[in-house]
Structure formats: C-alpha cells, structure tokens
Image (cartoon, rainbow, N blue to C red):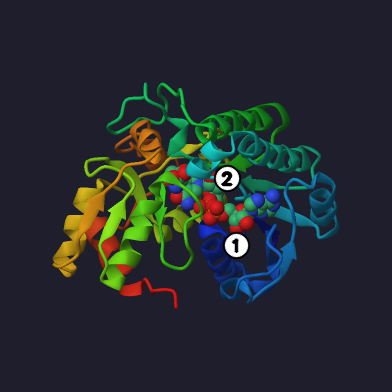
Amino acid sequence: MSKILIIGACGQIGTELVLALREKYGNQLVIAADVRENCPDIIANGPYKKLDILDRDAVREFIIDEKIEHVYLLAALLSATAEKNPDFAWKLNMEGLFTILDLAKEGYLKRIFWPSSIAVFGPTTPKVETPQQTIMEPSTVYGISKLAGENWCSYYHSKFGVDVRSIRYPGLISYKSLPGGGTTDYAVDIFYKAKEGKEFNCFLSENTALPMMFMDDAIRATIELMEVDQEKVKIRTSYNIAGCSFTPKELTHEIQKIMPNFKISYSPDYRQEIADSWPDSIDDSVAKKDWGWSSQVDLPKLVEIMLKNVSIPV
Ligand code: NAD
Ligand code: AKB
C-alpha cells in the first residue's frame, strides 16, 4: 500500500479528503500536512506534519524520508484572496506545484493529484455547458495560475511520464469545514445565516449563475480519478466535472421551500467581476466517458443536506 501525503490538509477540501482517504486506506497511511501549527480536531485521528509547501528543501526531505508515493497538493490562494495579493498568489500556487512535479520526475513519487478550477475559463469562454476544450483566457490571477499549472502538469506527463491527475472543481459546498476565500463561498455562508434565522447579504447579484458541487461528489470524483487505470486518464491538463448550477436567487428559493421566512439582500462587491468571468454551467461528458464520472447530488438534495448539518459556531 502506498503512503499518501495531503498538503493543505486543513482547508475546506483537505479535511474531508483526509477523512475519506483514511476511511479507505487506514489512518496511518494517510499523512495530513499544512502550514498551520496545529492539526484541527476533525483530522486528529492520524498523522499530522506542519509543512510549508514553499520550503522546497523541507518538503523534499519529508517526502523522500517518509517514502511517500502519492501526493494531493491542495495548498493555494483561492480567487478572491488571490486578487488581493497577486504576487504571493502566483508564488504559492506555482512554486509548490514544481516542487511536487520535480519529485515525481526524479522517481520519488508515483502519482500526484493537483486541483484546477472553473477559474481557468474567462470572459471569452462559451458560458453555457462550457466544453472540456474551449477558449481559455482567464482574467484573474487565480485563473491564470490554474491554467499555467494545468499546462505544466500536461508537460511533465508528456515529457517525463509523470502520472499527474487533475479536476477543474466547480464551487464546492460543504458543512464540515469552512471555505477559504473564494468567489463561490457565498453558497456556503448563506446556510449559516439561514440556520441562525438571519437575513443573508450576498456579495453577488441575484442572477449570477455559477457551477457548484456538493463536497461528497467532489471527494468521490477525486478518489475515483486517482484510482482509475493510467490508460483511462486521457486528459493530463485537467478534467471538467459538473454538479449543479444555480444563481443566488434560485438557491434562496430552494432554501425557502424548507425555511419560508428566510430572506436575502444583495450588495455585489469586487467578487462580482470574477463571477461574471466564469461559466454558468459545465459540460463534463469527457470525464463521464473516460473514467465513468457521474454526479449524485442535485440542488434540492444539496440544500436539504446543508440545512440539516450546518451547525452555528458558538
Ligand atoms: P482552503 O483555502 O480551504 O485550504 C487551503 C489550505 O492550504 C489551508 O488549510 C492552508 O492553511 C493551506 N496552506 C496555505 N499555504 C500553505 C503553505 N505554504 N504550505 C502548506 N499549506 C498551506 O482551500 P480549498 O478550498 O480546500 O482548496 C484546495 C485546492 O482546491 C486549491 O488548490 C483550490 O484552488 C482548489 N479548488 C477549490 C475549490 C473550492 O470550491 N473549495 C474549487 C476549485 C478548486
Ligand atoms: C473560488 O471561488 O475561488 C473557488 C473556485 C471555484 O476555484 N471556489
């Protein structure tokens, strides 16, 4: 059995991915790593290493000494935070990827997962049912870093045989850990306000449609892609996957079916421009064909699960 390292393990995806991989492969084989000093309680059921992905020597030493074979590299600045600090976003989102790709090129790692995003698309991309291959001219530093990263993954695969696999996640919605500075975060925040019985002030306008997905679907997609035979992975940039697409107004209506008194108001801010540059919906037929991907959670189910499980911080 391969030893697995998840870098950026304390974030929104990392916490749930650590739990799912430990469930599957056992607690001791799955090491959680993050720049944060302390391991959150939710993933304290297995090994934790404080590790800064920008410390190339420390990362190399740890991976080589521990004989890690699979790495999930999740550490990054997301779209909204990255626009506030473009220089650092570029550094964090790119340098760590090279450190991991190089370790695989040198034969230390057998397989890498590196997430991309719908942010690789831009204002000139067809917005509805955005295809796997299309115009890609992102207008955010986050999108530029993800598009460059995708192309580097493909390059390391074709030139050096590196087995790197990737998914363009849509906005992810979850209740086990909070989102970390993205444009789609409103679709998580809204559930906390609804549960508190408060009005939600949305930073996007009511008709802004975006591709979204419940976290369970995203974690399942990630593990399925990492487990599928090499020859089925035909795309080495990154795969489109789709869950459900909705606007803040449509999400509100769905919440109101369960909580009729819930209210929303709108104050679009700088994140509106980012959202306007992204697709409304995604065509994931290539992932379906290549490795059998299929989403299981639609909007009504997502809302039901979120309202049942979101707990208000005390
Ligand atoms: P997040 O912000 O919630 O978590 C990122 C984690 O990385 C944090 O725990 C942070 O402490 C850690 N980190 C930051 N700098 C680090 C460093 N120097 N060294 C080690 N760890 C560091 O992000 P997320 O939502 O879990 O996203 C994970 C990945 O998935 C990112 O690459 C992101 O671009 C991608 N993605 C996320 C979404 C989404 O909706 N959550 C959608 C598309 C793509
Ligand atoms: C963000 O909004 O930045 C992320 C993403 C879609 O990549 N959730």
The image shows residue 277 at horizontal and vertical percentages of 37, 30
The image shows residue 149 at horizontal and vertical percentages of 60, 33
- Quadrant of the image for the N terminus? bottom right
Among the 4 quarters of the image, the one containing residue 198: bottom left
Horizontal side of 63 relative to 162 (left or right) equals right
The image shows residue 304 at horizontal and vertical percentages of 26, 67
The residue lying toward the viewer, choosing from 288 and 217, is: 217
Horizontal side of 261 relative to 26 (left or right) equals left
The residue lying toward the viewer, choosing from 270 and 150, is: 270
The CB of the residue at mark 1 lies under 8 Å from ligand 1:
yes
Q: Sequence order check: which comes first, mark 2 or mark 1?
A: 1
Q: CA distance from mark 2 to mark 1?
A: 13 Å
Tag 1: amino acid = Cys
Tag 2: amino acid = Leu
Among the 4 quarters of the image, the one containing residue 42: bottom right
**Identity of the residue drawn at 30% across and 71% down:** 195
The CB of the residue at mark 2 lies under 8 Å from ligand 1:
yes
**Residue 63 visible in the shown view:** yes
Horizontal side of 13 relative to 212 (left or right) equals right
Question: In the rendered image of this protein, does residue 139 appear above or below residue 146?
Answer: above
Q: Nearer the viewer, mark 2 or mark 1?
A: 2
**Identity of the residue drawn at 37% across and 71% down:** 310
The dot on residue 96 is: none
The residue lying toward the viewer, choosing from 164 and 84, is: 84
Give the residue number, with chain letter if any, for mark 2. 77
Count of all numbered marks drawn on residues in the image: 2
Q: Secondary structure at mark 2?
A: loop
- Quadrant of the image for the C terminus? bottom left
Give the residue number, with chain letter if any, for mark 1. 10
The image shows residue 61 at horizontal and vertical percentages of 85, 53
**Identity of the residue drawn at 44% across and 54% down:** 218
